[in-house]
Amino acid sequence: MTAEPVDVTAAYYAAWKVKDFDTLRSLLAEDVDFIGPYGSATSADEFRAKIEVASEINTDIVVRKVFSDGPDVLTWFEMHTTVAEPVQVATWSHVVDGRIVRQRVAFDPRPITG
């Protein structure tokens, strides 16, 4: 039985929050297609590397709202960092067979990047 998309994304955020990058990577399709304010990735390993670097300043991930429509999950969360006030983030994840195959992230990076 394949996990529901909303459960996959919940596990993704739980893993990211505690910086469990092995679990986070296991939730990604090998050819995951990612685009966000800091760049893009076209493989699970590349995606993991980007999340690990970004997580060097992360102190918390606080999920505020989750909307789901079949394989698509939109997560609204606050990204807490050591360099700025919490940043509001919207992430659309497309999940197939228990893995995130596509993810698009939108937020204003200016508070973090200065």
Image (cartoon, rainbow, N blue to C red):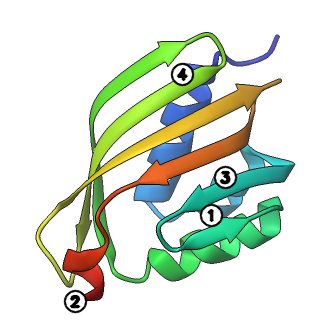
**Residue denoted by label 1:** 21
Residue 75 x/y as whole percent? 40, 34
Q: Residues within 10 Å of mark 1 (few under 14, many from 20)?
A: some
Q: Secondary structure at mark 3?
A: helix
| Extreme-left residue of the structure | 85
Q: Secondary structure at mark 4?
A: helix
**Residue denoted by label 4:** 6
Residue 92 x/y as whole percent? 52, 37
Kind of residue indicated by mark 2: Gly
Above or below residue 45? Residue 83 is below
Question: Looking at the image, is mark 1 or mark 2 nearer the viewer?
Answer: 2
Above or below residue 52? Residue 24 is above
Whether residue 65 sits left or right of residue 103 in the image: it is: left
Q: Secondary structure at mark 1?
A: helix
Whether residue 18 sits left or right of residue 24 in the image: it is: left
**Residue denoted by label 3:** 23
Dividing the image into 4 quarters, which one contains the C terminus?
bottom left
In-front residue for pair 40/75: 40
Above or below residue 100? Residue 7 is above
Q: Earlier in the sequence, mark 2 or mark 4?
A: 4
